[in-house]
Amino acid sequence: MKYAFFPGCVSRGGCPELYPAVVSVCEKLGIELEVMEGASCTGAGVLQEKNEKLGDALNARTFAMAEDMGLPIMTICSTCQGVMSQAHKRLEDDLDYRAEINQVLSEEGLTYKGEVVIKNLLWILVEDLGVDVLKGYVNTPLNGLRVAPFYGCYIVRPAGALGFDEHPERQDSLETVIEALGADVADFAGKTRCCGFPILTINERNSVAMVAKHTLDAKDSGADAMVTPCPLCHLNLDGFQPKAAAQ
């Protein structure tokens, strides 16, 4: 298995521990990565609120780069996955729009053909590597550890752009991986809600209140830890715990 690795911004910025961890895990699992040097930020949904066409052009550029590499894209960020998937759907649904975007890409000698596959590492573990194979790599099962899954927003909504109809296993993929590693799932209602990061810069108080609710709800469910496939959720939920506790 080989993928064009799109690490995103946060895994090498605000949460730099994530990038080497992913590389190390993929090496052990036999997942070959070719880093997409020169690929840009997805826009994270923020750019798209102001200029959707520009955001789609940035993502189409990344798609075209992956097509030239002859590889599917692997993301390690729910936000990147969601934003890319939505851009991909718009470009698939409107070929005239895709041609318009390709006109922009032509200035760089790129063309998006509509052939790219975009997958989060979470989905790759379940769908491509396989749960039984993953279990075979576990040397020290996480027996007795209760882990609360936290998907966040972008890897679950909108479901139509994220392939849930074709891949229903994605709906509980995080729980599947938790159990494959030997831990117990500490389920709680807020696992598919927003972590609060998108409003952090404009309304920190409410963002921190969301952190407090999610972390306390997870704790009340008996969780020893929370796990998320999104670096932005990780950054917000982990980094703002002290403020959440004080608030």
Image (cartoon, rainbow, N blue to C red):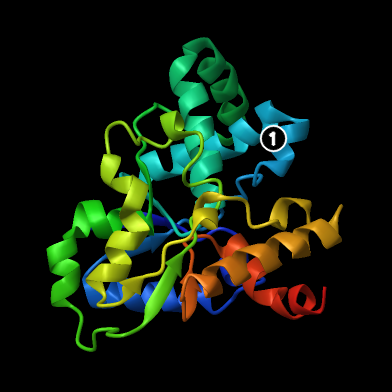
128 or 206: nearer the viewer: 206
Is 206 left or right of 11, judged from the image as shown?
right
Q: Position of residue 247 (x, y in %)?
A: 82, 73
Please, which residue is most extreme toward the top here?
96
Is 64 left or right of 116, judged from the image as shown?
right
Q: Quadrant of residue 139?
A: bottom left
Residue drawn at (29%, 55%) of the image = 124
Q: Which residue is mark 1?
A: 48
Q: Position of residue 113 (x, y in %)?
A: 39, 26
Residue 176 appearing in the image: yes
Q: Is residue 216 above or below residue 144?
A: above
Q: Is residue 192 above or below residue 17?
A: above
Residue drawn at (43%, 21%) of the image = 92
Residue drawn at (54%, 45%) of the image = 154
Is 151 left or right of 9, judged from the image as shown?
left
99 or 236: nearer the viewer: 236
Q: Quadrant of residue 237?
A: bottom right
Residue drawn at (65%, 35%) of the image = 55
Residue 71 appearing in the image: no
Judge the density around disc 1: few (<14), some (14-19), many (≥20) Cα neighbours within 10 Å.
Answer: some
136 or 181: nearer the viewer: 181
Disc 1 residue type (three-letter): Gln
Q: Quadrant of residue 175?
A: bottom left
Is 17 left or right of 64, judged from the image as shown?
right
Q: Is residue 101 above or below residue 9?
A: above
Q: Position of residue 17 (x, y in %)?
A: 54, 79
Q: Position of residue 185 (x, y in %)?
A: 35, 68
Secondary structure type for disc 1: helix
How many numbered marks have been drawn onto this rendered protein structure? 1
